[in-house]
Image (cartoon, grey):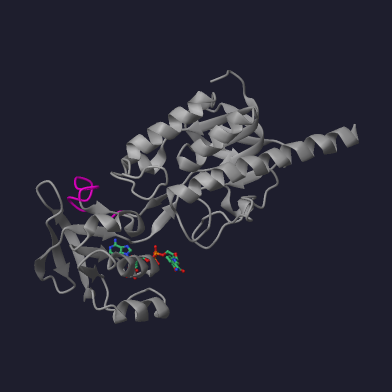
Amino acid sequence: MTDKNHYELVILGGGPAGLTAGLYASRARIDHVMIEKGAPGGQVLTTDWVDNYPGFPDGISGFDLMEKMTAQAKRFDVNILTKEVASLDLGDDAVKKLIFHDGSTVTCDSLIICTGASPNKLGIPGEVELLGKGVSYCGTCDAPFYRNMHVAVIGGGDTAVEEADYLTRFASKVTIIHRRDELRATKILQEMAFANKKIEYIWNTRVTGIEGDKEVERLSLIDNNGNTSTLDVQGVFVLIGITPNNSILPIQQLGADQWGFIITDCETRTAIPGVFAAGDIRSKLMRQVINACGEGANAVIAAEHYLISRLEANKLEA
Ligand code: NAP
């Protein structure tokens, strides 16, 4: 980490999008820093196994994948600063300011926001303990691990219903457990799910615990009348919404959708000139490592174009 406080480019966040942006920025010899509050890698660090990232025919653990991405970025001298940003001042188009908890600041000409998103948690016993051992927050990622098994999906929104349908390509049975007596999902998705013979429903019921010795074996349930029961399953997908990591971001200024994800154009540009967004924080359909990486690379190229056009404009003015 070089000891200075102004950069041509700051990358905020060190998950797959941020690390790829760091790799591209360092290879392009852009004066940059990637700021990450913890170890680089983001949420994928805690993902047990990634089976759908190209180049790894046997799959790879999330930890190993992110360690390899970090090592690759470091090979090109990515500049990493481990510090937690408290707030951003993006009021001045020319200079963007990041303020740390200790009051110190870093400024930059361009900024790529890669702060990600977090799946909502149930907060029940067993959820953390059995994560990656039958508890999952992503059907698209983990469905093939549940071939011919009985799994549960918790939630009744679009994601839960779409992922339940996807899971039936592998699982022998999928039980949707919903806290009300009707789904929140759009009607067309509901019709698709109701027509799928492999999907069953438990209505008006909450999951109070996830149990199992080494892997998920059963769920404890309570219905809205207080009756308790258990359900034997080998996997449980908690799909009760995701929250964008936007608490430090001026999202009105950046442009955000109704859930607080940043809206960009197809080149990752936000509403603020020189500010880009990549990865799960972007408003989009699919949130996977593969498109986060692509967007991180794209954002650096877009930032480079922005920096060059600024230089040219300054030359013309001089
Ligand atoms: P969502 O629409 O907010 O649905 C969350 C679901 O989880 C709801 O059914 C909710 O129950 C349930 N839930 C929330 N907290 C819970 C808890 N503590 N315990 C049990 N259940 C809980 O989230 P989403 O499905 O992830 O969708 C997010 C947005 O993305 C939506 O607007 C959706 O339309 C959009 N999306 C679109 C597509 C598509 O167009 N193909 C696909 C996926 C998502 P209640 O219904 O009782 O509140």
Q: Residue furthest top?
A: 3
Q: Is residue 95 above or below residue 82?
A: below
| Quarter occupied by the C terminus | top right
Q: Residue 189 location in percent, x, y?
A: 39, 76
Horizontal side of residue 240 vs 261, given as left or right: left
* Ligand 1: image quarter: bottom left
Q: Tell me if I can see residue 81 in this picture.
A: no
Horizontal side of residue 285 vs 163, given as left or right: right
Residue located 15% across and 67% down the image: 222
Residue located 24% across and 54% down the image: 145
Total number of numbered discs in the rendering? 0
Residue located 42% across and 76% down the image: 186
Q: Is residue 178 above or below residue 121?
A: below
Q: Quadrant of residue 154?
A: bottom left
Q: Is residue 184 magenta?
A: no
The stretch in magenta equals 121-133
Q: Main secondary structure of the magenta part?
A: loop
Horizontal side of residue 198 vs 253, given as left or right: left
Q: Residue 220 location in percent, x, y?
A: 13, 61
Q: Residue 48 location in percent, x, y?
A: 28, 44
Residue located 45% across and 40% down the image: 15
Q: Tell me if I can see residue 4 in this picture.
A: yes
Q: Nearer the viewer, residue 222 or 12?
A: 12
Q: Residue 174 location in percent, x, y?
A: 23, 68
Q: Nearer the viewer, residue 170 or 13?
A: 170
